[in-house]
Amino acid sequence: MTSQERIKALFEAVPGLDDSMDAARRRAATAIGAISLGLIAIIFAWLGDKAQQIFNQFQSQNPYAPLVLTPAVFVAVVWITNRWTSDARGSGIPQVMAAGKDLDLAYTKLLSMPTALAKLLLTVAMLLAGGSVGREGPTVQVAAAVMVTCHRLFRVPMTAGVLIAGGAAGVAAAFNTPLAGVAFAIEELAAAFEQRVAVLVMGAVVVSGLVSLGLSGDYVYFGIMHETLKVSSVVLIAPVAGVVGGALGGLFSRTLLAFARSGHSWFVMVRKRPVLVAFVCGLLVAVLGLVTGGSTWGTGYEVTKLMVEGHQSASPWFGPAKFLATAATAVSGAPGGIFAPSLSVGAGVGQLLAFCFPDDPMPAIVLLGMTGYFVGVVRAPLTAVIILMETTASRGMILPLFATAIIADAVSKLVCREKLYHGLSRSFSSHGEAKAKQA
């Protein structure tokens, strides 16, 4: 009998020993994965911020250069994505959803580390050119890929719970919002949220959050919002913010789903010319940035933070222009998330609504605008409320936020019945099946 056979016989002779070893390996894989993705999220955040700084400095010295640079980078990124790493296109959240529904996809390129690295680098490239993208969606895909890799190294079978935990930890690390990570797992990533998955999610969120907290410190993503609204104001403003934000968010979702999946001849023709579409989208983003003084380039984080803290208001055109810039960037098919840009669009919407209610504090109305539009896009009201409560430290606004979110969710459903991420995940599921058949 060989040594390997003796070891195997020993495991079989001791009841439960093999199962306990599997459980230990599973816990080790999850813990190491959570630590790794926390570190990656910090590096990704630093690279994204640095990319936006470089672009802003370059544009200030060369005011009209984006008219050439932005379309050129859009074309290059989309061509590279379609040519070599098509699984890295778009947000990243639909990819994780597709793999959660079909675990076989977790072992394809969809959640591989090369795809994750390409996702990270191409998203940074988009920020270097002023693309209206965020890093939260890409962080979710990268986090899931890290979890898959760790479980492969420890020879532990993948489960949907592991993917959900990785995605939740990715959201938590990207925004420094642990509660929002858990809520996002419940609302978006998990079709059935069991107790065992809940413990796994919370464990991964805690570990990745501690890594981020230890290295980056405790911070409030959008700054602290001190304002509140009177009950009489909430009764008037929350329904308006919910209706307007939900309708615009639903329109955004419907637009993206049409470009991604519609069988109409015009949309089919557009999808056959991805490079041309990328050029047109890039040119539109460049022009919008020049017209608005650069406020629509990048995530829109700086402008939004100033509005939330009440230090400065943006141009009245910021909201509509950011809406178009984000839609153009997303339609191009380039890698990049829509979380942060959508929150920025919502801030612009809230600012416009504040002009209609001049007697109430603008930062509070801006926050309701962010809630209404973000819920309209992602249709995850609990996640939206918790994200905004954690990123602005606005516990006094919790009830107005919930009222706005509930209304926005109902209105968005009337405009676009299918949830955005769920609709987009279907294309990756069919893509994975096609590749499996070819193999």
Image (cartoon, helix red, strand yellow):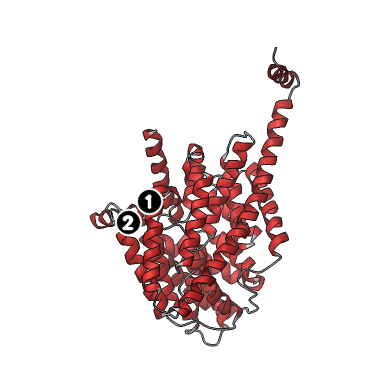
Question: For mark 2, does the 10 Å Cα neighbourhood hold few (<14), some (14 to 19), or many (20 or more) residues?
Answer: some
Q: Position of residue 407 (x, y in %)?
A: 49, 66
Q: Are marks 2 and 1 in contact (CB under 8 Å)?
A: yes
Q: Position of residue 229 (x, y in %)?
A: 60, 79
Tell me which residue sits at (67%, 38%) in the image.
26
Can residue 339 be seen here? The reply is yes
| Res. 274 mark | 2
Left or right: 188 in relation to 151 = left
**Amino acid on which the number 1 mark rests in the picture:** Asn
Quadrant of the frame with the N terminus: top right
| Residue most extreme to the top | 1
Q: Position of residue 116 (x, y in %)?
A: 52, 50
Q: CA distance from mark 2 to mark 1?
A: 8 Å
Which of 25 and 232 lies nearest the eye of the viewer? 25
Dot 2 or dot 1, earlier in sequence: 1
Can residue 252 be seen here? The reply is no
Quadrant of the frame with the C terminus: top left
**Amino acid on which the number 2 mark rests in the picture:** Pro
| Residue most extreme to the left | 265
Left or right: 82 in relation to 374 = left
Tell me which residue sits at (71%, 66%) in the image.
218
Label 2: state its secondary structure.
helix
| Res. 82 mark | 1
Left or right: 264 in relation to 395 = left
Q: Position of residue 426 (x, y in %)?
A: 41, 47
Label 1: state its secondary structure.
helix
